[in-house]
Image: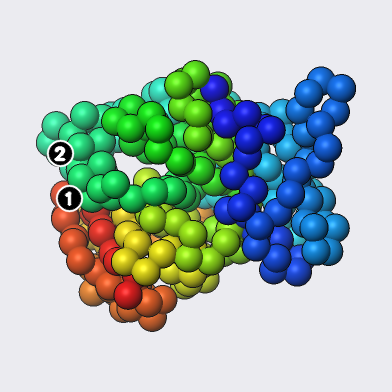
């Protein structure tokens, strides 16, 4: 079960129209639940979707998506991705046994007791579920720009996750308060995002000393490099450790750990 709409963490939200940090909920309807969030400063309204996610995108004509991003918006993607690909993806890409238990242990060790946590590019909520399984009381916000995957995330939520909530928004324009998050995690999403603006937004919303943890496909050599060049046509971007480190530094994030497993890199950076 997601956070009750009547108990959404509105203090963590930021108005995209005027920059007001801390939004408000509309009065409860007859069913006993609000149907929207609004800005008390400028009046901008952000509706709640059927999944329970707060929608900060709506239906704009300028939601430009790369082919890789558009696939995530296609019907059935979320169901198949979370059930047929994600549980075995790391073992296939690393060439070693890398199941959910190992991945979850690494993730929870790297974020420690950080709270709240933003799961950026959450898709069906795979990484959110890993950390909530270890700590059901942690405040976790799953964010994605595709409404369909957020439905999947909501359906897989457990009743004892009382502080789990969802947001539909862009990574390069986070509707979240500055310096409010203890950690930002991003599982298999960094290759698809506009890198520099997304990193800048990540750094903005992190508390001083807050951590950013990413798992993504790194730049490789050999036959895989040719394949990555082809995949680049879909909008995916692959980067080396040194290249990523420079982008992190420009955003005010210090690269602390970098683990390489074949195609896959795990990264831990700290906001300076």
In the rendered structure, the answer to whether residue 171 lies left or right of residue 8 reads left
For residue 197, say whether it is visible.
Answer: yes
The foreground one among 128 and 181 is 181
In the rendered structure, the answer to whether residue 151 lies left or right of residue 272 reads right
Residue of label 1: 262
> SS for tag 2?
loop
Snapshot quadrant of residue 34: top right
In the rendered structure, the answer to whether residue 221 lies left or right of residue 270 reads left
Placement of 109 over or under 192, stated as above or below: above
Q: How is the image coloured?
A: rainbow
Q: CA distance from mark 2 to mark 1?
A: 7 Å
Q: Residue furthest left?
A: 96
Residue of label 2: 95
The foreground one among 264 and 131 is 131
In the rendered structure, the answer to whether residue 95 lies left or right of residue 239 reads left
Residue 42's spot in the image, x, y percent?
A: 83, 64
Residue 161's spot in the image, x, y percent?
A: 46, 27
Snapshot quadrant of residue 35: top right
**Marks 2 and 1 close (CB-CB < 8 Å):** yes
Q: Earlier along the polypeptide chain: callout 2 or callout 1?
A: 2
The foreground one among 268 and 182 is 182
Residue 242's spot in the image, x, y percent?
A: 23, 74
Dividing the image into 4 quarters, which one contains the N terminus?
top right
Q: Residue at x 49, y 24 (%)?
A: 157
> SS for tag 1?
loop
Residue 173's spot in the image, x, y percent?
A: 61, 63
Please rate how many residues cluster around mark 1, counting C-alpha atoms within 10 Å: few if below 14, some from 14 to 19, many from 20. Answer: some
Q: Residue at x 45, y 21 (%)?
A: 160
Q: Residue at x 46, y 34 (%)?
A: 125
Dividing the image into 4 quarters, which one contains the C terminus?
bottom left
Placement of 270 over or under 47, stated as above or below: below
């Amino acid at each position: 079960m997601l956070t009750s709409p009547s108990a959404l963490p509105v203090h963590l939200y930021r108005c995209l129209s005027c920059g007001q940090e801390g939004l408000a909920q509309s009065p409860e309807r007859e069913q006993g639940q609000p149907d929207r969030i609004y800005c008390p400063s400028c009046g901008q309204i952000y509706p709640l979707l059927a999944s329970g996610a707060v929608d900060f995108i709506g239906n704009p004509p300028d939601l430009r998506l790369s082919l890789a991003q558009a696939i995530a918006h296609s019907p059935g993607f979320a169901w198949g991705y979370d059930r047929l690909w994600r549980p075995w993806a790391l073992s296939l890409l690393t060439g070693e046994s890398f199941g959910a238990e190992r991945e979850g242990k690494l993730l929870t060790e790297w974020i420690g007791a950080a709270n709240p946590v933003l799961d950026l590019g959450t898709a069906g909520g795979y990484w959110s579920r890993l950390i909530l399984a270890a700590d059901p009381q942690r405040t976790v916000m799953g964010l994605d720009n595709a409404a369909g995957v957020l439905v999947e995330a909501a359906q897989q939520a457990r009743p004892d996750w009382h502080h789990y909530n969802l947001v539909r928004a862009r990574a390069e324009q986070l509707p979240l308060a500055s310096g409010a998050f203890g950690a930002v995690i991003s599982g298999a999403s960094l290759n698809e995002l506009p890198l520099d603006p997304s990193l800048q937004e990540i750094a903005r919303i992190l508390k001083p000393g807050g951590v950013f943890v990413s798992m993504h496909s790194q730049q490789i050599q050999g036959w895989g490099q040719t394949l990555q060049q082809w995949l680049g046509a879909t909008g995916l971007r692959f980067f080396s450790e040194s290249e990523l480190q420079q982008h992190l530094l420009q955003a005010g994030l210090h690269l602390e750990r970098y683990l390489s497993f074949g195609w896959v890199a795990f990264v831990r950076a700290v906001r300076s």
